[in-house]
Structures are given as structure tokens and as C-alpha cells.
Image (cartoon, rainbow, N blue to C red):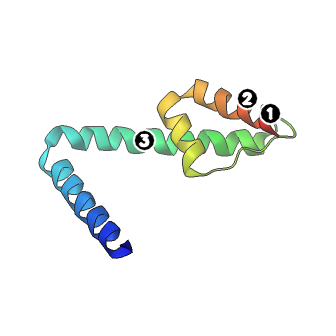
């Protein structure tokens, strides 16, 4: 069963890459997404090590970076609020 799921995942990934490579619009979207991803990771890194919010360290993982990429500055506030509330 595990082999079937890996085959489905690999096929889906191959088809997605094919669609992205064929579409000229997707290159602009992909570069914009990569820029936002780097900016989100850099913002979280600077937030952790600048000492602006003392006592809290937001982990750099796909979930937190994805939240900041999708939501921007409110995403950083959401992650900090969740961190303060849950821990």
C-alpha cells in the first residue's frame, strides 16, 4: 500500500511540474512565491534574534513560514499570539 501512495505522489508531482513549466504565467508566480518565502523566513529569523519579543522564540518550520507567506505581517502576529496563548 505504501508503494501505491508513493507512486501516486510521484505522478502528481510530475504532472504539477509539467504544468508549471509549460505555463509562462507560472514562472512569474513561482518567482513571486519564492521571494515571499525568503522574506517570511528572514522576518521570522530577525524576530527571533532581535529581541523585540523577549521570552518567545518562533520556530522556523514549514507551518510557521507558510503562515507568514500566506498572511504576511498578520501571520507573524498570529504565530506570536498562538505561541503566547498555548505556551
Q: Nearer the viewer, residue 85 or 27?
A: 85
Q: Quadrant of residue 25?
A: top left
Q: Nearer the viewer, residue 28 or 75?
A: 75
Query: Dot 2, how many residues are within 10 Å of its Cα: few (below 14), some (14-19), or many (20+)?
Result: few
Of the two numbered discs 2 and 3 on the same chain, state the one appearing first in sequence: 3
Compared across the picture, whether 52 is left or right of 6 comes to: right
Tell me the CA gap for discs 2 and 1.
5 Å
Query: Dot 3, how many residues are within 10 Å of its Cα: few (below 14), some (14-19), or many (20+)?
Result: few
Compared across the picture, whether 2 is left or right of 8 comes to: right
Q: Residue furthest front?
A: 1
Does the residue at mark 2 contact the one at mark 1 (Cβ under 8 Å)?
Answer: yes
- Mark 2, secondary structure of its residue: helix
Query: Dot 1, how many residues are within 10 Å of its Cα: few (below 14), some (14-19), or many (20+)?
Result: few
Q: Nearer the viewer, residue 7 or 34?
A: 7
Compared across the picture, whether 29 is left or right of 66 comes to: left
Q: Quadrant of residue 43?
A: top right
Q: Which mark is residue 64?
A: none
Does the residue at mark 3 contact the one at mark 1 (Cβ under 8 Å)?
Answer: no
Q: Which residue shows up at 77% across the image and 40% down it?
A: 50
Image coordinates for residue 41, horizontal then vertical, percent: 57, 45
- Mark 3, secondary structure of its residue: helix
Image coordinates for residue 47, horizontal then vertical, percent: 71, 38
Q: Is residue 52 visible?
A: no
Tell me the CA gap for discs 3 and 1.
28 Å
Relative height, residue 16 to residue 32 (above, below): below
Query: Mark 3 = which residue?
Result: 35
Q: Quadrant of residue 55?
A: top right
Q: Quadrant of the C terminus?
A: top right
Query: Mark 1 = which residue?
Result: 84
Of the two numbered discs 3 and 1 on the same chain, state the one appearing first in sequence: 3
Query: Mark 2 = which residue?
Result: 81
Amino acid at each position: 500500500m505504501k508503494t501505491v501512495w508513493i507512486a501516486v505522489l510521484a505522478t502528481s508531482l510530475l504532472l504539477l511540474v509539467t504544468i508549471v513549466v509549460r505555463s509562462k504565467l507560472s514562472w512569474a508566480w513561482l518567482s513571486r512565491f519564492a521571494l515571499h518565502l525568503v522574506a517570511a523566513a528572514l522576518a521570522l529569523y530577525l524576530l527571533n534574534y532581535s529581541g523585540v519579543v523577549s521570552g518567545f522564540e518562533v520556530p522556523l518550520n514549514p507551518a510557521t513560514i507558510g503562515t507568514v507567506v500566506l498572511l504576511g505581517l498578520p501571520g507573524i502576529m498570529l504565530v506570536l499570539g498562538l505561541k503566547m496563548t498555548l505556551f
